[in-house]
Amino acid sequence: MKKTHIDLEGKCILVTGSPGFIGANLVLRLLEDYKYCTIVSLDSMNDYYDPSLKEYRLRMIEKKALSLHRRHIFIRGSIADRMIVDGVFATYRPDIVINLAAQAGVRYSIEHPEVYIESNITGFFNILEACRHSYDRGAKGVEHLIYASSSSVYGGNKKVPFSTRDRVDNPVSLYAATKKSNELLAHSYSKLYNIPTTGLRFFTVYGPAGRPDMFYFSATKKLAAGEKIQIFNYGKCMRDFTYVDDIVEGIVRVAGGAPERRKGRDGLPVPPYAIYNIGGGTPENLLDFVNTLQEELVRAGVLSSDYDFEAHRELVEMQPGDVPVTFADSSALEKDFGFRPGIGIREGLRRFAEWYKDYYGV
């Protein structure tokens, strides 16, 4: 699909889900790269995981903005609150919208489905409606909406690597179902209201100051506390881990290339809509990943060199909602934007282990 180039410099960029894990890293990157942008952050700061980690990321953002004399506005609120979303759009009139706000986690969705409907469905609908009305009365409106989808939409797909051309009609978790719903809603709004939208299917994002519910983070906390870690599917899982800096690089590149607006033979808009995978394309065996994590935790001094790893690991069956393999085909991203994630597991986990030691004072 042809792209309309967007120079991000000088734009007003709304990032929802900041200071979440990916959102915070994205905002830090935007503040670093663009002198004249206005960055508006919106987040509910909920307690799905320890809010102090979000406060820590927010302080990093505010410190960066202050040191570089950049304009950053943080608004505490939920995208599920229509009045807050409409108020943000009316006040700041964003040129670019990057929607990363969502209730994350596959297993949490089994016990708390209502939270996913509120944030991932109602919240995303509010964002789409605000984008739609940004064009009212002939206004220029939103130039590009980028939103987070997930590799979870592929479900138990046995064809690998996963391609955006594959059918994704059989989600195995409510979380995956809400992300697929986001893609369908975005397509409808692109078609009906000519809104340029791009969905990004993220593959197992990890890195420093990440989400504590992610396996690499929770496993580290348990090992440091002398507890056992559970390795699901008896270690026979493959995951396409993607370091957070690679995710951010992909988002920034995609933000600058909106799907082209054009009309079809019927005179109606051809949906300016695109979907991309962002994944490393090199799945790691879960046991190998755990071994590398343990080695880097010892190297960083989080664990002692004589730590008995065998006594602190337990192989267990697959959990509901999980899938045995994730494997990204990111060739479309490389073709359209000249980028493919490339930061390896060893380097990524080393950075995480060093951050963990510093943050928790191990």
Image (cartoon, rainbow, N blue to C red):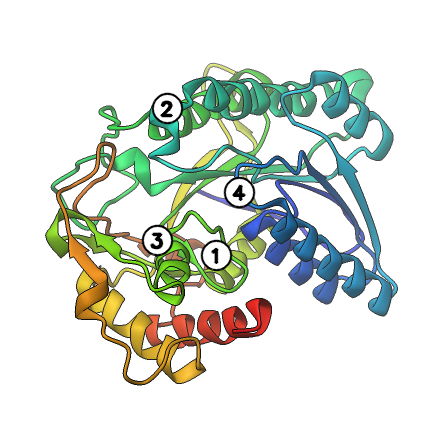
- Report the Cα–Cα distance between label 3 and label 1: 18 Å
Q: Earlier in the sequence, mark 3 or mark 4?
A: 4
- Report the Cα–Cα distance between label 2 and label 1: 29 Å
* Residue that mark 1 sits on: 247
The one nearer the camera, 277 or 324, is 324
Circle 3 Cα neighbour tier, 10 Å, few/some/many (<14 / 14–19 / ≥20): some
Q: Amino acid at mark 4?
A: Tyr
- Report the Cα–Cα distance between label 4 and label 2: 15 Å
Circle 4 Cα neighbour tier, 10 Å, few/some/many (<14 / 14–19 / ≥20): few
The one nearer the camera, 40 or 19, is 19
Image coords of residue 229 (percent x, y): 27, 56
> Can you tell which mark lies on residue 347?
none
Q: Amino acid at mark 1?
A: Ile
- Report the Cα–Cα distance between label 2 and label 3: 18 Å
Q: Residue at x 80, y 33 (%)?
A: 93
Q: Amino acid at mark 3?
A: Phe
- Report the Cα–Cα distance between label 3 and label 4: 14 Å
Q: Secondary structure at mark 4?
A: loop
User: In the figure, residue 129 lies in which quadrant?
Assistant: top right
Q: Nearer the viewer, mark 3 or mark 1?
A: 3
* Residue that mark 4 sits on: 49
Q: Amino acid at mark 2?
A: Glu
Asked whether, in this view, residue 162 is left or right of residue 152, the answer is left
Residue 273 seen by the camera: yes
Residue 134 seen by the camera: no
Q: Nearer the viewer, mark 2 or mark 1?
A: 2
> Can you tell which mark lies on residue 215?
3
Q: Earlier in the sequence, mark 2 or mark 1?
A: 2
Q: Secondary structure at mark 2?
A: helix
